[in-house]
Image (cartoon, coloured by chain):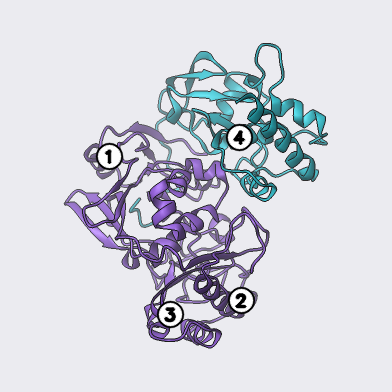
Amino acid sequence: MINFQYVRANDVADAVRHIATDPTAKFIAGGTNLIDLMKDDVERPSRLIDISRLPLNTVEETTDGGLRIGALVPNSDLAYHPLVQSRYPLLTSAILAGASQQLRNMASTGGNLLQRTRCAYFYDTATPCNKRTPGSGCSAINGLNRIHAILGTSEACIATHPSDMCVALAALDATVHVTGPDGERTIMFADFHRLPGDTPQRDTNLRPNEIITAIALPAPRFVTNYSYLKIRDRLSYAFALVSIAAALELEGGTIADARLALGGVAHKPWRDTGAEAALRGQPANQATFTRAADLLLRDAKGFEHNAFKIDLARRGIARTLTQAANGTPQSQADKKVR
Amino acid sequence: MARTSTAARPSKQTIPTQDKISIALTVNNVERTLQVSPWTTLLDALRDHLELTGTKKGCDHGQCGACTVLVEGRRIISCLTLAVMKDGAKVTTIEGLAANGALHPLQQAFIDHDAFQCGYCTPGQICSAAGLLAEGKAKTVNEIRELMSGNICRCGAYPNIVAAIQQAMGQTGEKS
């Protein structure tokens, strides 16, 4: 790890002041991804601003019946929070599908949104990577791209966003609260992460010197008919090849409303409102689920080693929607997919 | 957070070395003061500064769990933790689990069940299991396996590790 300066922020305003003074400074909270990237020389901050002691670690009910989750709430605390378990079980399930308990104990809510791709070429400073060094080229497009994206890719980058938690947050219409030099603003979750386009170095639409302070969830829905299915190369502690968050509101056997988002397939959590619209008003059966999957995957594009993901996603979507419709969500401990 | 490039700093540029920072840690119930650089990990502080070499450096990238210790009673990965960020914290390592000359129930259970071969992952396994017991979320074998998945055992002693943890859960239950 290279040398860097260290400073501890006293409050949010202090943190924003510190980051604005140094264009190569970074915030650090849990550090689970940043420290790793620094050890590999991928991230080279001149200064770390420690925000881990800021008072952003509470989960509070909001007046509209939703929740406001402080940006520093550890992933494990969020997953096991009684209000999250009872009102947003899809979020609990997605969080518990990711990383390990040690890492979830460290990783912050805000940091989870800001983790970088696990593309091996992004980590390998000996290879070109447009995300790490803009304009240097993409090693993955014609390289070992088994884990890479099938949706929303560009000629510059086919990396995926690695988070499980964010897939559930996308499905649940979360909003991201940020503070910057110009004050506070709120970003819809769908607008927070970016597709790579020709600027894959930018993962998110955070502006310079902004800090995430909270994630807000609207009043709970989808408490009964939901599931988060994560498909990966080993049963635990691995990033998703494909993951699916599905949530339904049923009236009899008919789908009144639906949420459908995927992880492991794109540069951002991939929610498709068109596929959700195709589910609405339809009978909750295999034909409906397959049609929605086909619609979601209509523009999917495989590369040399990851084309299998398209069929995996198609079957996974149908399976997860079936689990949701049956009210039998995927268990993250019992690995059997039913 | 909002930085647009990961390699913003030219590779040859040097940052003036920050003076070492004085931090206090209560390690295994003993208050220790040490001088660390900002980039010193908690793992290196324990092993190199405090000579507590029970905690192991496996991958040094948070992927193996060998460096697991307890901070304020919660299991964390010490190789991805900056020591300076834990100033004032209470840290428990494998050296601090035994009390009053008696092995911790997990240590005894690992011996009883032969829950290791080479032993390199064992301090991390036991500290992780101690965190698991404190959390109280794992009740079934599947839940133990899932919530211990952050600790890799290259020798493959997993069935015996699970059995050892089950034994310790029983002992803990009887005492409480």
What is the chain letter for disc 3?
A: A
Among the chains pictured, the one given purple colouring is: A
Q: Mark 1 against mark 4, which lies toward the viewer? A: 4
Rendered image quadrant of residue A317 = bottom right
Percent from the top left, x then y, of residue A13?
21, 40
Q: Mark 1 against mark 2, which lies toward the viewer? A: 2
Q: Helix, strand or loop at disc 1?
A: helix
Q: Mark 4 against mark 3, which lies toward the viewer? A: 3
Label annotation for residue A15: 1
Which residue is pictured at 50% across the width and 41% down the height?
A: A105
* Count of picture labels: 4
Q: Helix, strand or loop at disc 2?
A: helix
The C terminus of chain A is located in which quarter? bottom right
Which residue is pictured at 41% across the width and 44% down the height?
A: A45
Among the chains pictured, the one given cyan colouring is: B
Percent from the top left, x then y, of residue B64?
65, 43
What is the chain letter for disc 2?
A: A
Q: Nearer the viewer, residue B15 or A116?
A: A116
Which amino acid is tagged 4? Answer: Leu
Label annotation for residue A252: 3
Q: Which residue is mark 4?
A: B133
- First in sequence: mark 1 vs mark 3: 1
The crowd level at tag 1 (other Cα within 10 Å; few <14, some 14-19, many 20+) is many
Q: Mark 3 against mark 2, which lies toward the viewer? A: 3
Mark 3 to mark 2 CA distance (whole Å)? 29 Å
**Label 4 in the same subunit as label 2:** no
**Label 4 in the same subunit as label 3:** no
What is the chain letter for disc 1?
A: A
Q: Helix, strand or loop at disc 4?
A: helix
